[in-house]
Amino acid sequence: MEEIQIITPEELKKKLEEGEKLELVDVREDEEVAQGMIPGAKHIKMGEIPANLDYFDKDKEYIFICRSSHRSGNVCYYLQEQGYKVRNMIGGMLAWPGDVE
């Protein structure tokens, strides 16, 4: 199994502050997302990823986010096997130093 690329919360925050256009996907459950998401992230629950494959473009890279980075890591393995470019935000929202909306 190919290793999943990662990004730290600090790296992600810096890229967003510099205005970089990133594809962020939050895979947490509704009640978790209600507590706040990274601005600009799209919410697709982990269990709904297979039904939403048409949302993803194989030419783009997606950064996946969850509470602690375990579920998003599983999503990354799944999508990488399907041929998508993915990156996991390690530490998840527990480690996110920036604002939420």
Image (tube, rainbow, N blue to C red):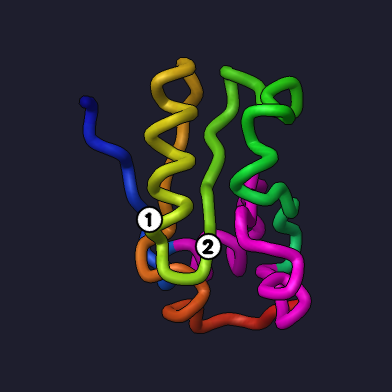
Name the kind of residue labelled 1 in the image.
Answer: Ile
Residue matched to label 1: 7
Picture residue at 72% right of the left edge, 28% below the top? 51
Query: Which residue is at a point 58% across and 19% down the rendered structure image?
Result: 59
- Place of residue 9 in the rendered image (x, y in percent of width and height, measured from the top left): 43, 69
Left or right for 90, reference 25? left
Q: Which residue is mark 2?
A: 66
Q: Closest to the observer: 10 or 52?
A: 52
Give the quarter of the figure containing the C terminus.
Answer: bottom right
Q: Decide which of tag 2 and tag 1 comes sooner along the chain.
A: 1
**What SS does tag 1 mark?**
strand
Q: Dot 1, crowdedness within 10 Å: few (<14), some or many (≥20)?
A: some
Distance from Cα at disc 2 to Cα at disc 1: 13 Å
Q: Decide: marks 2, 1 in contact (CB < 8 A)? A: no
Considering the image in quadrants, where does the N terminus appear?
top left
Counting other residues with Cα less than 10 Å from the Cα at mark 2, is it few (<14), some (14-19), or many (20 or more)? Answer: many
Q: Position of residue 93 (x, y in %)?
A: 52, 74
| Residue that protrudes farthest toward the front in the picture | 47
Helix, strand or loop status at disc 2: loop
Identify the residue at image location x=40%, y=20%: 81
Q: Left or right: 53 with respect to 15?
A: right
Q: Which residues are magenta?
A: 12-38
Amino acid type at mark 2: Cys
Q: Is residue 81 above or below residue 99?
A: above
Q: Is residue 76 above or below residue 38?
A: above
Decide whether residue 82 is among the magenta residues.
no
- Spot occupied by residue 74 in the image (x, y as percentages of width and height): 41, 44
